[in-house]
Image (cartoon, rainbow, N blue to C red):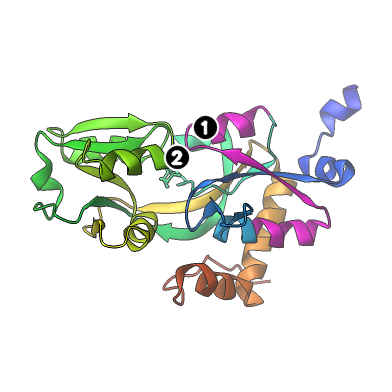
Amino acid sequence: ILSSILYADKLEDIKKAGVLKAGVKYDFKPFGFISKSGNVVGFDIDLIKYIAKKLEVPVKFEQVTSKNRIPMIVTGEIDIAAASMTQKRSRDDVIDFSISYFFDGQAMLVLNEEKATNYEGFVDKKVGAIKGATSGENFKKLQPKAKIIYFEEYPQAVLSLKNAKIDAITTDLVWCVTQAKDSKGKLKVLEQVLSYEPYGMGISENESNFRDFINNAIQDSVTDGTYEKLYLKWFDKKPEKLPEVWPK
Ligand code: GLU
């Protein structure tokens, strides 16, 4: 027992277990969502599949939400979260992050008939945000006179917006743009960028070998062209900014 405590190593444990338990979103298209055929798909899912191939183990995908993804890493229910998660110093207290693998910023999703064009126009208005996401707190700082309405998951917020029970949803731009596109003209995006949201994969604290493995795999996906291929597949354009690649 003592030796397993002293030499516990997540990377070895995963290989021994023969499975990578990966936490992904089911409600954040195009990063993680359920396809028409009922499979979990998206940019985060494809990156995890790439990493698992390098690890030579199959993946078991677990659904996470913005709220429970960090606790699920801490308890070990999942080995890694690739879940549209912004890396922040405050979040780094209890987990570790990989290098950044995607770069976004917060925007607003509104009804097509919305007159306001930026956050200044949301005094006394209801702005939806998801529990555990960065967006509610960020917005409150910019516009303290807005009323932030919190939801457990994204689909509930979208339904509420479509029924005009709230005036906006604030979260990362790429999700907002995707929702607007899928709404057939009902929703639009206010593209004013309200924050910087670099995504990192979340892993347990102090697992240096595992973190190196993940960081190397992300970098390999850039150098072998997979990253750009997946980016094109899910975002329909070439990446403006690539994850950092360290010299060999
Ligand atoms: N990237 C933001 C965050 O980590 C918003 C997206 C999400 O809810 O996952 O909080």
Query: Which residue has dot 2 on it?
Result: 89
Whole-percent x and y of residue 52? 75, 56
Relative to 100, 39 lies left or right: right
The magenta segment is 47-75
Where disc 1 sits, the SS reads: helix
Q: Is residue 82 above or below residue 9?
A: below
Q: Is residue 85 above or below residue 55?
A: above
Mark 2, ligand 1, within 8 Å: the answer is no
Q: Could you classify mark 2 by the number of other residues whose Cα lies within 10 Å: few (under 14), some (14-19), or many (20 or more)? A: few
* Residue found at x 45% / y 47%: 86
* Residue found at x 80% / y 56%: 55
Query: Which residue has dot 1 on it?
Result: 93
Q: Could you classify mark 1 by the number of other residues whose Cα lies within 10 Å: few (under 14), some (14-19), or many (20 or more)? A: few
- The part of the image, by quadrant, that contains residue 144 is top left
Are dots 2 and 1 in contact, CB under 8 Å? yes
Query: Which of the pair 113/201 is nearer the observer?
Result: 113
Q: Is residue 117 magenta?
A: no
- Residue type of the residue flagged with mark 1: Asp
Where disc 2 sits, the SS reads: loop
* Residue found at x 39% / y 55%: 175
Locate the C terminus by quadrant: bottom right
* Residue found at x 53% / y 31%: 68
Whole-percent x and y of residue 76? 70, 31
Q: Is residue 239 above or below residue 210?
A: below
